[in-house]
Every structure is written in C-alpha cells, then in structure tokens.
C-alpha cells in the first residue's frame, strides 16, 4: 500500500473527481472531458498490448492487460474519467453465445434467431467471465489517480440484441427488427435475458469500484417510435431502476445514438441521470436538455478529431461555449476512429483546458 492510501479521507477521493460534479448539479469550467473509445487502435501502446494478448476477447478477460489499456489514455492525456476496457459483446459471450473478433472485420457471433437457439444462453453461465471484468475494475480503482473517475458500461439490450440476432454488425439491423415484428413475445425473451444480465453485470462493476455507468445504445436510431418505446426505453428503464435501487449514488448515462427526435421520451421514460449526444444532435437541444437538469455529454464529430487543425479548435470552442454554465461533460458524438493522430487528442484536451 502506498503512503497516500493510508490517509484517504472517508469518501476515498470521490469528492476530488471533477467528472462527477455535473451530476450533483454543479457546472464545471472547463468541463470534464473523456472520449468514447479513448483506449484503442489509434494508440501505438494499445496495439502492442493487443498483439501480446492475441485475441481481442482475451484482452477483455485478462485483468492485468485490460487495466493497462484502460490506463494508457489517462497517462497520455489526463482525461477526467477512465472507461473500463471491455466490450458490449462480453455479455452475449458470457451468456454462452460464441463470439469472435475477426482481424479487421469486426465481431462475428453464431446468430441466435429462434427460441431453440435462445435456450442455449443462460444467466448462470456468466459468473466466471463477469468476475474477470470486475477484477479489472478493482485493479483500476487501485491504480488510477484518485482524481480520475472510473466509468463502467454495458451495451443496451436492444443494441446487443442486434448483434446477437444478426451475428455481426449490419447497416439496418434487419435480423433483430424482423424478429421483433414477427414474434414480439419471443424477442422479448431475448431482451429480458439481456436486461437481467446487464443489471448483474453493471451492479458487479459498481461493487468493484465503478463511479458511474454508461449504457451504449448505438443502434437505437433504427427503430420506429412504438418499437423504440418497447425495445429501447422499457429495458433501459428497468436497468436504471434496478441498478439505482442497489446503488442510488452512482450516475447512469444513456447513449441512444441517432435518437435526438425522441430524446425527451427517452429521458422521461428511462430516468437516466445523463445523456450522451451523438454528432448530429443540435447544440440547442443539448442546452435545452441540460437546462432541465440532466447532464449532457458530447458531441464533437470523431472525424473532425481525426482531421484536426483550426476547424477542430473552432468546433471545440463552439461546443464548450454553448454549454458553459450548464451540467456538461465534453465528449465525442461517437467513438474515436483508428486513424486519429494522438496529437489531435492532446490538442483537444489542451484547448479545452486553456482558460478563456
Ligand atoms: C457497438 C459497440 C461495440 N462495442 C462498443 C459498442 C458501443 C459503442 C459504439 O457504437 O461504438 C463499446 C466499446 N468497445 C470498446 C470499448 C472500450 C472502452 C473505450 O471506449 O475505450 C467500448 C465502450 C473496445 C473495443 N471494441 C472493439 C475494439 C477494436 C478491436 C481491436 O482492437 O481489435 C475496441 C478497442 C471491437 C468492436 N466492438 C464492437 C464492434 C462493432 C467492434 C468492431 C469495430 C472496431 O473494430 O472498431 C461492438
């Protein structure tokens, strides 16, 4: 144990974590910042550990290595929050579906499209793999600077179900959408299983030391309003309710990508504490949402971060200025792309923290 650990105050350093301040209603200037996919292939040190691990899932399930790649962007850029290194597809993998990540091709799963297929998955399978992820969280809470918050996460049931049913990423999520139309009760069983698994998974991460949680719903934007209610809002609301009942002080952020038009229903229906806005969400809507007391996160275009230059500086200033005085966390509108020069990330953080 290091000397500084011995004299920790009662809250274990939580009060020093700037990332958490907007969630208690305090606007922070400059705003706290972290970036979706801040660990990943754009960093040479990530590519090295990734090669050492062999497979992507091996990296997710090896606490020493997963913690190391989580810490890399914190060391380089000093973000206000670290996000646990894992993947949303750890949940179906742990439930018993076969998940592989093909080099350069993205995820491949043995698709599940019938109730007979679904019977192969079970909550009771998840323990070993979920505990490996929680071990990473414990390690991180010990190794992170005390002022850095730690964000745990899962995929929202709808987005995870699109991969479970399709067996891969797709442009229209047709396997899940058609299953939901053809046999809503059967599809509901898949959603219910993913919801229950997500509740256990997130609660485990909080018990292990996560300060906040994010629920990634990357494909929320492909649904009609009634389907959005049933497959996005209802399961997310259940996760929020159950996790909050166990851990009332841990903020939960939703990321319903592509759903700006349904943002109000999402916020009302799910009860999330904060919302991450994608790049197409207007700054005016982000301001309006923050004025209603929800923490807003976002929404720089990851491709502008990759492009860099003065256009990047200008947009960083515009977003920051628009959100000054409001409960806001600076972030991207989606994940960092692999060809992003790390210098641009350093430039973004430096610009944001310059006093103006
Ligand atoms: C849909 C989704 C997935 N995973 C995730 C989402 C939701 C957010 C989004 O929409 O981007 C979330 C995710 N994936 C990863 C994290 C780690 C934490 C972080 O943000 O730094 C998080 C939070 C690591 C990862 N997840 C993946 C990588 C790259 C794999 C590698 O290193 O070989 C990383 C760093 C792989 C992955 N994982 C997934 C896909 C489609 C892919 C392939 C695409 C790609 O390769 O970028 C599923």
Image: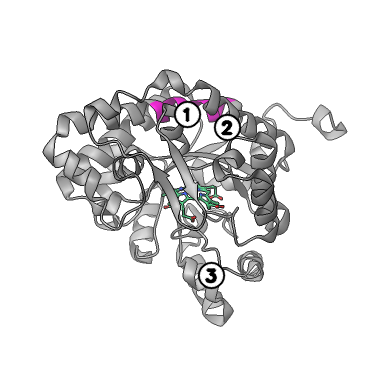
Task: Read off the residue under disc 1.
Answer: 201
Pinpoint residue 257: horizontal percent, then vertical percent: 35, 54
Give the residue at mark 3: 305
Magenta-span inclusion, residue 200: yes
Out of 288 and 271, give the one closest to the viewer: 271
Q: CA distance from mark 3 to mark 1?
A: 32 Å
Q: Position of residue 46 (x, y in %)?
A: 66, 54
Please tell me whether the stretch drawn in magenta is mainly helix, strand or loop: helix
Dot 1 falls on a residue whose secondary structure is helix
Q: Is residue 173 magenta?
A: no
Q: Which residue, as the protein is rendered here, is positioned at the far bottom?
A: 310
Question: Which residue is nearer to you in this view: 160 or 93?
Answer: 93
Question: What is the basis of the colouring in this image?
Answer: one colour
Q: Earlier in the sequence, mark 3 or mark 2?
A: 2
Residue 133's disc is 2
Magenta-colored span: 197-207
Q: Residue at x 70, y 26 (%)?
A: 10
Residue 134, numbered circle: none
- Determine which quarter of the picture holds residue 230: top left
Q: Are marks 3 and 2 in contact (CB under 8 Å)?
A: no
Q: Residue 9, position in %: x, y?
A: 74, 29
């Amino acid at each position: 144990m290091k000397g500084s650990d011995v004299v920790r105050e009662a809250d274990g350093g939580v009060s020093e974590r700037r990332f958490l301040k907007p969630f208690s209603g305090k606007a922070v200037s400059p705003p706290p910042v972290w970036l979706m996919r801040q660990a990943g292939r754009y960093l040479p040190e990530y590519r090295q550990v990734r090669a050492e691990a062999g497979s992507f899932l091996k990296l997710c399930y090896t606490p020493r290595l997963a913690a190391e790649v989580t810490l890399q962007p914190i060391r380089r850029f000093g973000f206000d929050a670290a996000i646990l290194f894992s993947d949303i597809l750890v949940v179906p993998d742990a439930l018993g579906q076969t998940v592989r990540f093909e080099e350069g091709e993205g995820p491949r799963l043995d698709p599940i499209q019938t109730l007979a297929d679904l019977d192969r998955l079970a909550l009771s399978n998840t323990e070993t793999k979920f505990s490996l992820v929680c071990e990473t969280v414990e390690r991180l809470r010990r190794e992170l600077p005390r002022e850095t918050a730690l964000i745990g996460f899962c995929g929202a049931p709808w987005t995870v179900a699109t991969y479970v049913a399709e067996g891969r990423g797709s442009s229209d999520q047709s396997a899940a959408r058609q299953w939901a139309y053809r046999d809503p009760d059967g599809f509901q069983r898949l959603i219910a299983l993913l919801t229950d698994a997500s509740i256990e998974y997130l609660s485990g991460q909080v018990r292990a030391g996560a300060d906040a949680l994010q629920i990634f719903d990357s494909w929320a934007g492909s649904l009609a309003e009634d389907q959005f209610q049933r497959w996005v809002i209802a399961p997310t609301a259940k996760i929020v309710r159950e996790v909050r009942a166990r851990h009332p002080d841990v903020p939960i952020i939703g990321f319903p990508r592509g759903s700006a038009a349904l943002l109000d229903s999402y916020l009302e229906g799910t009860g999330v504490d904060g919302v991450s806005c994608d790049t197409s969400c207007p700054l005016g809507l982000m301001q309006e949402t923050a004025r209603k007391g929800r923490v807003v996160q976002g929404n720089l275009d990851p491709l502008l971060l990759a492009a860099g230059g003065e256009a990047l500086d200008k947009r960083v200033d515009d977003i920051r200025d628009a959100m000054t005085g409001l409960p806001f966390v600076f972030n991207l509108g989606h994940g960092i792309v692999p060809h992003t020069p790390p210098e641009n990330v350093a430039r973004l953080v430096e610009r944001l923290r310059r006093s103006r």
